[in-house]
Image (cartoon, rainbow, N blue to C red):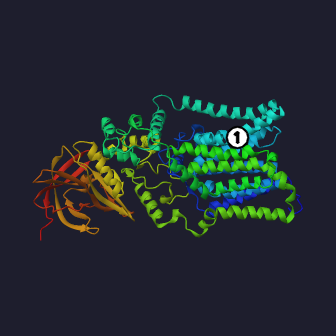
Amino acid sequence: MRRNSLSVRQTQCLFLLFHGMALLYAVFFLHPYYGSNDEFSLAAIASGAYGEPSWYFIYLHSGFGWILKAFYTLAPGVNCYTFVMYGMIFLSLTAIGFVWIGRGKKTGAIMAVMLTLACLQPLYVELQYTKTAAVAAVAGYALLFAGGRRPKSIRTAAGICFLLMGSWIRFQAFGMVSILAFGMWLFKGYGAWRKKEWKVFFVQDCLPCLAAFALVFGSMAAENLLVYTPDSPQAHYREYDRARQQLLDYGVPEWDEYEADYEAIGLTRTDCINLQNWLISDYDRYTADTFRAIVDFRKDRPFQWEYLLDYLMILAKKPLFLLSVLMAAVWLFPLSNVRKRKNGFPVSYPFLALLCVYLYFISIYRVLPIVVTACLISCLVFVWTAAEDEIASKWEDKLKGKRLFGTAFAGVALTAGLCVRMLAAPLFEPPVQSSASAVAFRTLYDTISKDKKIYYAFDPLTNNGMELGYSVFEKIPEEYLTNIFSLGGWETESPQVVSNLEHYGERSLLTSLYKSDRAVLISNTLMEHIMLHLQDTYDGIFITYSKVNQIGDFDLFALNYKMSGLEDAEYTASLDRTYTAEEDRYDVFEATVDMTPEELSGKSVFLWMKSVESGKRRMYQGVWRQQNEDGLYSMIYDSALEETNQVRFMIPRMSYPLDERYEVHVVIRDKDKGRRLVTENHLYES
């Protein structure tokens, strides 16, 4: 290198080697994770964890879904979702680096290395498909606009493919990048106007973009025709999700300000709270029409100028933004004569476009970190690309021997210094995936997912899979989540989740909870919230809950309702003893049932009580004193486990004893039929 003997091709190969080493460093030392709950859900769908692998991936274009499905067909035991996304990032950053090195071998190599270091954490560590789409689109525009004046069919075709892939992965990201890239196209047009080279401009800079846009919008039209056909599950979900975005992405109006409007469409304060917390899985209540009705009466809020200050403060701390500003300063420094600055517009335009994009999003979000990062990657690449020509012409010949090595080392040190929190600190921290809470939560998922006779409803506790102890390289087992559902967010109406619910004979998750003894809720706060929702929404239903199991630090609760049409049975039962548990927060009742194991097989048990004074009735789920290999008590009698006729009920602490003031019965339930046993109360005998 000191002798300046490396060719452009050799320099590109060295960069490719460095990029591969940087990727290995990120994978093995920086603890990669999914950057959003959307990403984890998409990986789960791709892995077949919702029933079977699908070509429909909610936010991804179906064309990209078919690509993923093909990879899973070839390698079904591998988490192809992550590897395909990593492949797109690797190819995109490599393409940008190759373009820069081709334009200026020494300065381009230094810039390519700095870009790789700056993008390790936001792209490879915090894997998120919006940012992946952005960098793919950026690579496409770099190949088309900055790959040299000579038309090369391979480079042009690669640029078009990158743009198409970026739009397929996330069309909104493709749109944002296109706005930032527009300045490069305008500058190309201005140059053609000055030099009277309209034919060259049209062939080299316009036709490839037109071809890319034709493929992008043509593929969207094909998807609309072939996938979003009328009355299909995909068409229903797209309509639902668009209405959901109009309301929830913008913000749900407060109940106190719009009480009359809410009541006019049949919604209560509880419904408003549910919407504000994204607990929208009640299909009967939170429909696309409901969302649109709220949008219709919601007033436009004034522009929140204080949010712009928040964005500017965030930008001031972002390494990607600081590196963009630094390159602009390096470009500005040697060009003291204003008239000699040829690239002033394309260098400054990305910053202006960045501000405009943020001004648009401020009307929706206060802070949107993923969009911020995606736009910053685009801004950095376009600023550096625009500045490179003049920087290379000024410094390329001066970078020789030790000066080249020193400059390269300074660039690496600067980038690593700005990204020290992202590139160095994780070396001294254990991965979140192996923390005690993640291991406990993963154990919980592993345990409850084994029993397909019971389905489990989770609150939106995990946002990216880390709490599950999942690595982004670990394939989520097929049918792993078929009996596990989230109570919040867009996925509750997606075709994959809906098909799972229909597999269990239910259409709507939330409204089905009060009809089934198979539903177990996690988290006290969510459980009480849902109890309030159901009791407030459905007349005649009295919701109760009982604790049925515990795994690590996680409690499992059963949600119950008032059974009607109970039949009296000739069998008998006895309530044997009672005590308090967990610092007197629960009353525990133990009982015995006079039935044979064959008669109990597949049945669940409840404690039915009626106040003699008020006539109010309550029912609580119980568990059979059978324990499986995971230490869980059986909610449904399992004949494969050790025989028993003993039952345990754990219910919230009662204000007074369950004595003669209550008529008490043990109820045996087989699906939707319940039989009330003659029950002797021995709880308070000395």
Residue at the image point whose x is 32% and y is 41% from the top: 259
**Position of the N terminus by quadrant:** bottom right
Callout 1 crowding tier (Cα within 10 Å): few <14, some 14–19, many ≥20:
many
Residue found at x 43% / y 48%: 482
Q: Residue furthest bottom?
A: 686
Which residue occupies the foreground of this view, 274 or 551?
Answer: 274
Residue 505 position (above or below residue 585): above
Closer-to-camera residue (121/232): 121
**Residue 154: quadrant of the picture:** top right
Residue 343 lies left or right of residue 663; in this view the side is right
- Snapshot quadrant of residue 166: top right
- What percent of the width, then of the height, locates residue 193? 79, 33
Question: What is the number of callouts on the image?
Answer: 1
Which of 6 and 588 lies nearest the eye of the viewer? Answer: 6
Residue depicted at 61% across the width and 42% down the height: 176
Horizontal side, residue 552 vs residue 544: left or right: right
Residue picked out by circle 1: 183
For the question of whether residue 399 can be seen, the reply is yes
Question: Is residue 404 depicted above or below 143 in this figure?
Answer: below
What amino acid is found at the position of numbered circle 1 in the picture? Gly
Quadrant where the C terminus is found in the figure: bottom left
How far from the left and from the top, in percent, is residue 684? 13, 67
| Quarter holding residue 416 | bottom right
Q: Position of residue 560 (x, y in %)?
A: 27, 51
- Specify whether 277 is left or right of 663: right
| Residue that appears at 12% across and 52% down | 614
Of residues 224 and 643, the one drawn nearer to the viewer in this rendering: 224
Residue 88 in view (yes/no): no
Element under disc 1: helix
Where residue 85 appears, as percent x and y from the top left, is 62, 49
Residue 252 lies left or right of residue 43; in this view the side is left
